[in-house]
Amino acid sequence: MPQIKLCAVSEFGEENVKTFRVGKKDIAVFKVEDTFYAIDRKCTHLKGNLAKGKLVDKTIQCPLHGAIFNLKTGELLKQPGTLAGWFKKAKNTTIYRLLIKDDFLFLEE
Ligand code: FES
């Protein structure tokens, strides 16, 4: 399974999110306590930037219309709460496997 180096773990510092472009994948990596989670950066509803969302425990809330996703499973926990959500539904998102090796974060493809 190919592994793609993303960054040094220390590069997160006090930040809890970083974004990466890996081929055609646009990925947001969240740090929750000492665990990292990688999901598609774009919301499955209308492509809101989840990297700018509200991080609560192991969930991320989309900044555009409020859909909430489980960072560990990618499961959609709450549909968008506005009229936009009434017209178009969000769905589960894609998650990616991460690996920490020699203090570097890798994406497994
Ligand atoms: S774009 Fe994310 S909830 Fe609408």
Image: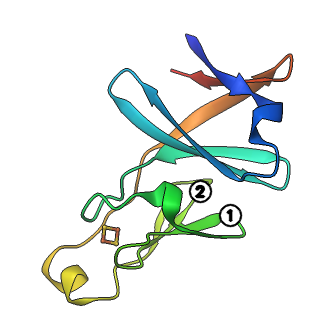
Image quadrant where one finds the N terminus: top right
Q: Position of residue 89 (x, y in %)?
A: 23, 73
**Of the residues under marks 1 and 2, which one precedes in the sequence?**
1
CA gap between label 1 and label 2 equals 5 Å
Q: Residue at x 84, y 56 (%)?
A: 33
Q: Nearer the viewer, residue 35 or 8?
A: 8
Q: Residue at x 85, y 23 (%)?
A: 103
Give the image quarter of residue 76. Answer: bottom left
Left of 60 or right of it: where is 83? left
**Furthest-top residue in this view:** 2
Q: Residue at x 27, y 65 (%)?
A: 45
Q: Secondary structure at mark 2?
A: loop
Q: Position of residue 92 (x, y in %)?
A: 39, 59
Q: Position of residue 58 (x, y in %)?
A: 68, 64
The answer to whether the residue labelled 1 contacts the one labelled 2, judged by CB atoms less than 8 Å apart, is yes
Residue type at tag 2: Leu
Q: Which residue is mark 1?
A: 58
Q: Nearer the viewer, residue 79 or 41?
A: 41
Left of 42 or right of it: where is 77? right
Q: Secondary structure at mark 1?
A: loop
| Res 1 visible | no
Q: What colour scheme has been applied to the protein in the rendered image?
A: rainbow
Compared with 46, 61 (above or below) is below
Residue type at tag 1: Lys
Give the image quarter of residue 23. Answer: top left
Label 1 crowd (10 A; few <14 / some 14-19 / many >=20): some
Disc marking residue 71: 2
Report ligand 1 position as a quadrant: bottom left
**Furthest-left residue in this view:** 87
| Res 43 visible | yes
Disc marking residue 96: none
